[in-house]
Amino acid sequence: MAKQEKLPAPDPEEGEEGEKKVETKQGFVKKLLGNKKLLMIAGGGALVLLLGVGAGLYFFVFSGSGSSGNAETASVPEIPATPPQVAYYDVPDLIVNIQTSDGSAAYLKLSVSLELFTAEEKAGVQALTPRIVDQFQGYLRELRADDLKGSAGIMRIKEELLRRTNVAAAPYRVRDVLLKEMIIQ
């Protein structure tokens, strides 16, 4: 047997005739579409960019909703040509004894003014003053000195006095109860 000469192993890139296959170059788009990771990152970036542009347009261009878009006129509130129709009625000063934790005597002097919607209601509320004072007396006598401490305590008193005033002056509505003086002694 004759020795066979060892032929070099065929190159996988060579064809039958020994010629190298021409490598087909993939286009940039095909590479992008083939690489899922890169496609997801690019899609997320595009989404963030679109959301940013949309938010910028909304806040800076369309936020005026009918106004001229001038920043100076948007920040200054418009002052009405005529003042609001309000009237004030002063309730007579109230002096009541309040409860203390140690049982000692403590007194509360309260001066209140009622804010009404119109001046015509002032006469009606004036006629109902005894009913309003009675409501105030009943509530204030049940208070303790600790109930009057701090701004939260004062706001609770104002809200309760407003509620009781609107109940006592039933056909008339009171807008607010304004404290003029409050002394605890």
Image (tube, helix red, strand yellow):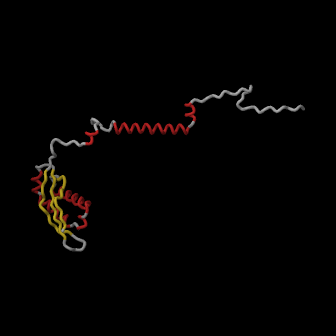
In percent of width and height, residue 115 lies at 16, 53
Quarter of the rendering occupied by the N terminus:
top right
Instruction: Measuring from the top left, give residue 90's x and y in whole percent.
Output: 12, 57
Residue lying furthest bottom: 103
**Residue 36 drawn at (x, y percent):** 56, 38
* Residue sitting at the far front: 72
Quadrant for the C terminus in the image? bottom left
Identify the residue shown where x is 78% and y is 32%: 8
Q: Quadrant of residue 53?
A: top left
Which residue is at the front of the view, 181 or 114? 181
Q: Nearer the viewer, residue 125 or 7?
A: 7
**Residue 143 on image: x %, y %:** 22, 66
Identify the image quadrant of residue 144. Answer: bottom left
Q: With 18 as the anchor, is 68 left or right in this view? A: left
> Furthest-right residue in view?
1
Residue under the point 23% across and 64% down: 148
Q: Is residue 124 above or below residue 146?
A: above
State the count of labels: 0
For image coordinates 77% across by 33% down, the residue present is: 9
The residue lying at 55 percent from left, 34 percent from top is 32
